[in-house]
Image (spheres, rainbow, N blue to C red):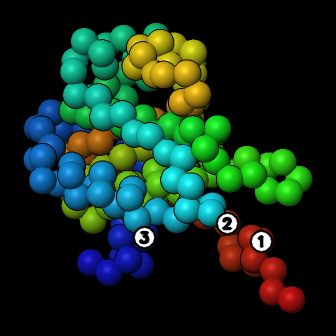
Amino acid sequence: MNIHEVIKKRRSVRSYKSEPVEEEKLNRILEATLSAPSAANRQPIYFVVIKDEKIKYQFKNAYKAPWFYTAPIIICACSIPEKGWKRNDGKNYADIDATIAMDHLILAATSEGLATCWVAAFNVSIVKSILNLPPGIEPVALTPLGYPLDIPEPTLRKPMEEIVKTI
């Protein structure tokens, strides 16, 4: 599958098979995050892979959707703002770098036949506590990771004319 096919195939999946993800696939997916660009190559990113069912159960206090817990793995993408590059107006790029790395992870998962669903509507303080994150590491996004039970149809996307301006 070429990159354009992978991008078109990616879906936000909300139902997963219980079968485990092979370690070699998981490692390839995580390796994809290492190739993500980051501002000034600071790489202010940190990922937590959650397989433990007890910890996944605790996540229900941070994000309530029951489908989220059907996947065998949950991944938390974090930023390290202190290490992020700052633009001259003070904007910190750490969260952006973490989201780019998460996108690499999601596309790599798709290429491996696995499914994900980007989730940002979670309680940050609960996630930090459950994962016992060190000070300065901020959860940015979560995704379940596993084999899809159902693959949804593509969602409606805006036409290019609405999102691109050529001058």
Q: Position of residue 10 (x, y in %)?
A: 39, 61
> Residue 111, percent across and down?
27, 65
Q: Are marks 2 and 3 in contact (CB under 8 Å)?
A: no
Q: How many other residues sit within 10 Å of disc 2, few (<14), some (14-19) or many (≥20)?
A: few
Q: CA distance from mark 2 to mark 3?
A: 14 Å
Judged left or right of residue 53, residue 164 is right
Dot 3: element: helix
Q: Percent position (x, y) of residue 149?
A: 22, 43
Nearer to the camera, 156 or 3: 3
Labels 1 & 2 near each other (Cβ < 8 A): yes
For the point 12% across and 53% down, the residue is 24
Q: Which residue is mark 1?
A: 162
Q: Quadrant of residue 162?
A: bottom right
Mark 1 secondary-structure assignment = helix
Residue holding disc 3: 8
* Left or right position of 72 against 91: left
The residue carrying pointer 3 sits among few (fewer than 14), some (14 to 19) or many (20 or more) residues within 10 Å by Cα, namely few
What residue is at 11 percent from the left and 47 percent from the top?
A: 22
> Which of 111/102 is in front?
102
Q: Mark 1: give few (<14), some (14-19) or many (20+) Cα within 10 Å.
A: few
Label 1 – label 3 distance at C-alpha: 19 Å
Q: Is disc 2 placed on a helix, strand or loop?
A: loop
- Residue 167 in sight here: yes
Question: Mark 1: which amino acid?
Answer: Glu
For the point 21% across and 52% down, the residue is 27
Nearest the viewer among 23 and 160 is: 23
As measured in the structure, the alpha-carbon distance from the residue carrying label 1 to the one carrying label 2 is: 6 Å
Judge whether residue 71 can be spotted in this image: no
Question: Percent position (x, y) of residue 1?
Answer: 26, 78
Furthest-bottom residue in this view: 167
Name the residue carrying label 2: 158
What residue is at 31 percent from the left and 19 percent from the top?
56
